[in-house]
Image (spheres, helix red, strand yellow):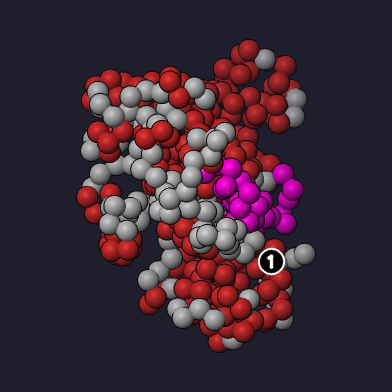
């Protein structure tokens, strides 16, 4: 990435707000490249390969995991950032780190852990991702966490409750929690990753839903966006009508992603031209500039409604979700009662509920299942 081609409103690593603990600059990498590399080499990043996206990891080898999802988000975000002359290294770092705090079993695990922590401050996976890179990773002798730059940490903390933002600001007044109290925006790079995350979800959950058999190709005709794109593919490649659906679905989703990224780039460029921010700090004081067009937002909303109805609330997914919630809740109860069952650095923590939540959140799906079986004697999922 050529830093001299960055837009004036992009995050320039040469003008970074820095790290919580000052470090000498790298001779060969800018600050956000350094962040990306630290994330890729972290333990939490490797664990993502065995963390659920929608389907539990053992249900199939080809379904997305948190790792493959994060890679797809990074690819989409970099493509859009390049077209908008934004900081590609920063969007990649944010994208690769945004799910580091996610629990095993996807949103089911997160919801269960939040219920368990109801009387102890709750559980937010975005806040947990920041907690991972700020404190829980143990790799460096001089500090806990990864000591990432402010800009990457700002992008990781996509959502945050006011109560938790107040707590963050008390500890770090100018840190990434401040904007949730001030009502300001993050950098344009962070905004872009947020929408790339949504875009990746929409595409790969359709793909995995069809692969699983829970969604049929015929059902996709109910979604106007997909029906239109599918018709375009068949008009160009009529022979696909008589073949297995894999090529037809893949080409339809490829065109959907291309259309979404083009719309995101065009709509964001128009918003930037309208508001003409002088620099990245001006971006933070404006309404969100990364956006889809109104027509695309409507189409995406229709697609989300379809996925909620036909995939996320499918009886088979609901059954799996219920069992996953049980695993997390029973693990939490077991470790609260017997902290010695956890590693010493968790067992000896002063705040036991938070230590238990940290330990469970860091688990992969299969490790959580093994621990659940060890502690309870139950097998809630087939091997």
As drawn, is 176 to the left or to the right of 24? left
Image coordinates of residue 204 in percent, x first then y, are 59, 39
**Residue 301 picture quarter:** top left
Residue at (27, 57) in percent of width and height: 173
- Which quadrant would the C terminus be assigned to in this image? bottom right
Camera sees residue 232: yes
What is the magenta range?
35-62
Residue at (57, 58) in percent of width and height: 140
Whether residue 38 appears in magenta in the rendering, the answer is yes
Above or below for 139 versus 65: below
**Relative depth, front residue between 335 and 113:** 335
Residue at (56, 75) in percent of width and height: 346
Camera sees residue 221: no
Image coordinates of residue 69 in percent, x first then y, are 58, 43
| Residue at which label 1 appears | 367
As drawn, is 16 to the left or to the right of 345? left
Above or below for 240 versus 197: above
Residue at (27, 36) in percent of width and height: 281
Image coordinates of residue 335 in percent, x first then y, are 57, 80
Predominant SS of the magenta segment: helix
Whether residue 368 appears in magenta in the rendering, the answer is no
Query: Residue extending furthest top?
Result: 236
């Amino acid at each position: 990435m050529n830093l001299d081609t960055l837009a004036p409103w992009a995050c320039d690593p040469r003008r970074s707000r820095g790290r919580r603990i000052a470090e000498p600059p790298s001779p060969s990498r800018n600050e956000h490249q350094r962040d990306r590399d630290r994330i890729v080499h972290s333990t939490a990043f490797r664990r993502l390969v065995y963390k659920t996206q929608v389907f539990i990891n053992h249900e199939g080898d080809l379904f997305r995991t948190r790792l493959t999802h994060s890679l797809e988000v990074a690819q989409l975000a970099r493509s859009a950032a390049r077209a908008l002359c934004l900081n590609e290294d920063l969007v990649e770092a944010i994208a690769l780190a945004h799910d580091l705090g996610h629990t095993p079993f996807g949103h089911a695990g997160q919801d269960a852990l939040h219920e368990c922590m109801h009387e102890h401050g709750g559980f937010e996976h975005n806040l947990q991702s920041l907690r991972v890179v700020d404190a829980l990773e143990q790799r460096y002798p001089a500090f806990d966490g990864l000591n990432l730059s402010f800009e990457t940490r700002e992008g990781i903390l996509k959502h945050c409750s006011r109560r938790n933002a107040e707590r963050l600001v008390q500890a770090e007044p100018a840190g990434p929690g401040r904007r949730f109290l001030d009502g300001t925006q993050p950098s344009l790079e962070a905004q872009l990753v947020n929408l790339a995350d949504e875009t990746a979800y929409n595409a790969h959950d359709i793909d995995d839903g069809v692969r699983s058999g829970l969604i049929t190709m015929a059902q996709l005709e109910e979604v106007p966006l997909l029906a239109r794109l599918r018709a375009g593919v068949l008009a160009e490649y009529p022979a696909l009508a008589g073949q297995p659906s894999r090529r037809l679905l893949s080409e339809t989703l490829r065109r959907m992603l291309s259309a979404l990224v083009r719309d995101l780039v065009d709509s964001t460029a128009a918003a930037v031209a309208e508001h003409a921010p002088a620099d990245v700090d001006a971006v933070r004081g404006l309404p969100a500039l990364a956006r889809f067009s109104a027509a695309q937002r409507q189409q995406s909303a229709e697609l989300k409604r379809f996925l909620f109805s036909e995939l996320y609330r499918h009886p088979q997914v609901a059954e799996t979700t219920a069992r996953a919630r049980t695993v997390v809740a029973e693990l939490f109860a077991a470790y609260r009662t017997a902290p010695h069952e956890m590693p010493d650095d968790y067992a000896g923590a002063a705040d036991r509920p938070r230590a238990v939540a940290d330990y469970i959140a860091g688990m992969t799906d299969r490790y959580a299942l093994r621990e659940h079986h060890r502690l309870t004697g139950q097998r809630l999922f087939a091997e």
